[in-house]
Image (cartoon, rainbow, N blue to C red):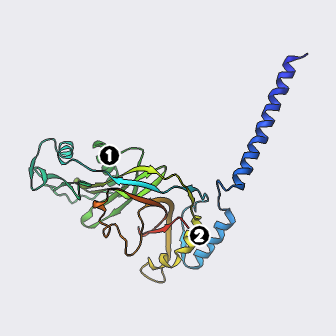
Amino acid sequence: MDWSKAKNILIIAFIITNIFLGLSIFKNMKQYNYFYSVNGQRIKDVISILEEKDIIVKTDVPKDVPKLPALTVKYETYNGNEMAEKFLETYIEKDKEYVKGNESVKVTFNNKLLIYERKPEIFSLKDISQEQAKKIADSFIEKYGFSGKNVEHWSTTKEQYDEYKIIYKQKYNDMFLNDSEMKVIVNNTGVVRFERKWLQPKVTKMYEKRVIPATKALLMVIDKIKRSVNDEDDKAVITSIRLGYSFEISEIDTLANREWHNMESGEVLPYWIICLENNEFIYVEAYE
């Protein structure tokens, strides 16, 4: 017997068997709806509907429609003395604030909000660019150990007095946690204010639910998108569409009304987050 030839035949048979097995698993996954995606034609149709309403989409519309769990989270807490040593090294404490020269550190809202401030002693007329401001902010959070894989730049906006506000959000499994952020205020002298409010995902719920497609989310908020522009004749521009987690968002149930700083833990749900060119964000609950 030609064992070499027989061996090759067995290998080919094994490969063919694996292919058929893979196709069978793929078919079963589709049958039982383990994954789902929106086809390209549906996305084109929705974009056309939005354009008829003077809404321009300048980003990719996500095709994937995953099953996601709700998450249980709690807020990270900070020790005032430890944070003062991190930022100031030496300091004096007065009125629950840690001070060194023109710098100060404060831990407030039940130790769940960390604030660092620096009052510039010298002002310059020189302006900085948005890119320079972000580099300064990136270096700052890296210096103090607040950067990492779960941190991602969210937005940079120019404020009054030639200051920039750079926002970083926390990510969990590649999705943003909306209620968790760092805010860095930068001007031509450097960082003048830093705030950190961060979440700790505790438990992933055992159940998962299918989210609504991004196309459906867009159609649900056409009127809200239109109201975001100042002039009725202006076009609204969508710059990003992404999935994230957030506490329940409504007109009467805001984070302030729920006194977030008194929460021991809470549940966050998936949301489609639609970002507009004017830096306004529209949230659509992703569960049916």
Query: Dots 1 and 2: beta carbons under 8 Å?
Result: no
Question: Residue 258, how many percent across, how many down?
Answer: 32, 67
Judged left or right of residue 213, residue 106 is left
Tell me the residue at 53%/65% (across/down). Answer: 287
Q: Which residue is mark 2?
A: 216
Question: Residue 119, how many percent across, how many down?
Answer: 16, 56
> Around disc 2, counting alpha carbons within 10 Å, would you say few (fewer than 14), some (14 to 19), or many (20 or more)?
few
Tell me the residue at 59%/69% (across/down). Answer: 216
Tell me the residue at 49%/64% (across/down). Answer: 239
174 in relation to 272, above or below: above
Q: Which is closer to the viewer, label 1 or label 2?
A: 2
Question: Residue 153, how many percent across, how many down?
Answer: 40, 53
| 1 or 2: tag closer to the N-terminus | 1
Determine the image quadrant of residue 266. bottom left
Label 2: which secondary element: helix
58 in relation to 265, above or below: below
173 in relation to 215, above or below: above
Q: Which residue is mark 1?
A: 146
> Around disc 1, counting alpha carbons within 10 Å, would you say few (fewer than 14), some (14 to 19), or many (20 or more)?
few
Judged left or right of residue 144, residue 88 is left
Tell me the residue at 48%/77% (across/down). Answer: 224
